[in-house]
Image (tube, grey):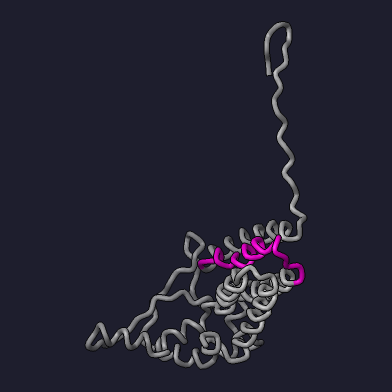
């Protein structure tokens, strides 16, 4: 239901179809539902990117207004501190600097929330940023990963498959912080995948120092 609200019923069905496939494959092994639970949680995390449309939807679905009314009897103006990718400029630390936006922003959010159908299409101006393209690629990569795991899943490599399925948990933050996390996760992804397929390279043993006697003096 959350993914239906986030995008539409077809998007939610895309999620359900993959989770059901994982459940079927894991059930055959008779070792519980750890992989299914991991995919159910972290595939949803990748699909439900908190982009501009989602921020607008969360602000305007009624809960934010209800929370305001529960705390304040009335107010004249609202202001929002945001870092819109098309407007915000990076600060000295490289992070986008937030700017103050007036009450009109709430009205803009209502319109933007209705445009969520543009997400991922050629008309999605927000989707053209490097971060949004990276996020969409992560979804495709994760789907491909799960297909690869299911094709070779056994009781012996199940634990590694679960580790792989949980990797999106480490992808947090925004901007350059998120990008750095993705780079680190991709490295772990490759290492774990090699282990899953039994191709992990063994670390060469370190040479052991052997004492040698030279001219009656024990030396290493």
The percent coordinates of residue 129 (x first, y second) are: 60, 75
| Residue lying furthest front | 30
Give the image quarter of residue 17.
bottom right
Give the image quarter of residue 209.
top right
The percent coordinates of residue 180 (x first, y second) are: 58, 60
The percent coordinates of residue 211 (x first, y second) are: 70, 18
Give the image quarter of residue 39.
bottom right
Q: Is residue 152 magenta?
A: yes
Q: Is residue 137 visible?
A: no
Residue at 52% in and 66% down: 172
Query: Magenta region: which residues?
Result: 151-173
Q: Is residue 190 left or right of residue 41?
A: right
Q: Is residue 174 magenta?
A: no
Residue at 68% in and 78% down: 24
Q: Is residue 1 visible?
A: yes
Picture mark count: 0
| Residue lying furthest left | 73
The percent coordinates of residue 64 (x first, y second) are: 36, 85
| Above-or-below relation of 134 to 110 | above
| Above-or-below relation of 210 to 172 | above
Q: Which residue occupies the foreground of this view, 87 or 153? A: 153
Q: Which residue occupies the foreground of this view, 1 or 152? A: 152
Q: Which residue occupies the foreground of this view, 100 or 7? A: 7
Residue at 62% in and 62% down: 163
| Residue lying furthest top | 216
Quarter of the image with the C terminus in it: top right
């Amino acid at each position: 239901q959350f993914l239906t609200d986030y995008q539409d019923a077809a998007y939610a069905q895309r999620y359900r179809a993959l989770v059901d496939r994982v459940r079927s494959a894991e059930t055959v092994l008779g070792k519980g539902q750890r992989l299914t639970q991991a995919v159910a949680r972290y595939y949803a995390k990748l699909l439900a990117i908190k982009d501009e449309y989602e921020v607008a939807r969360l602000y305007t679905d009624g809960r934010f207004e209800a929370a305001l009314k529960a705390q304040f009897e009335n107010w004249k103006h609202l202001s929002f501190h945001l870092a819109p990718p098309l407007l915000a400029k990076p600060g000295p630390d490289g992070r986008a600097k937030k700017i103050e936006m007036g009450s009109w922003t709430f009205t803009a959010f209502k319109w933007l929330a209705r445009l969520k159908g543009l997400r991922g299409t050629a008309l999605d101006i927000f989707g053209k940023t490097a971060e949004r393209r990276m996020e969409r690629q992560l979804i495709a990569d994760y789907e491909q990963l799960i297909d690869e795991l299911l094709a070779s899943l056994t009781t012996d490599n199940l634990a590694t498959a679960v580790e792989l399925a949980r990797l999106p948990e480490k992808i947090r933050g925004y901007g350059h912080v998120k990008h750095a996390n993705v780079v680190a996760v991709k490295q772990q992804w490759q290492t774990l995948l090699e282990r899953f397929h039994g191709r992990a390279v063994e670390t060469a043993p370190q040479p052991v120092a052997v004492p040698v006697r030279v001219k009656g003096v024990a030396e290493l």
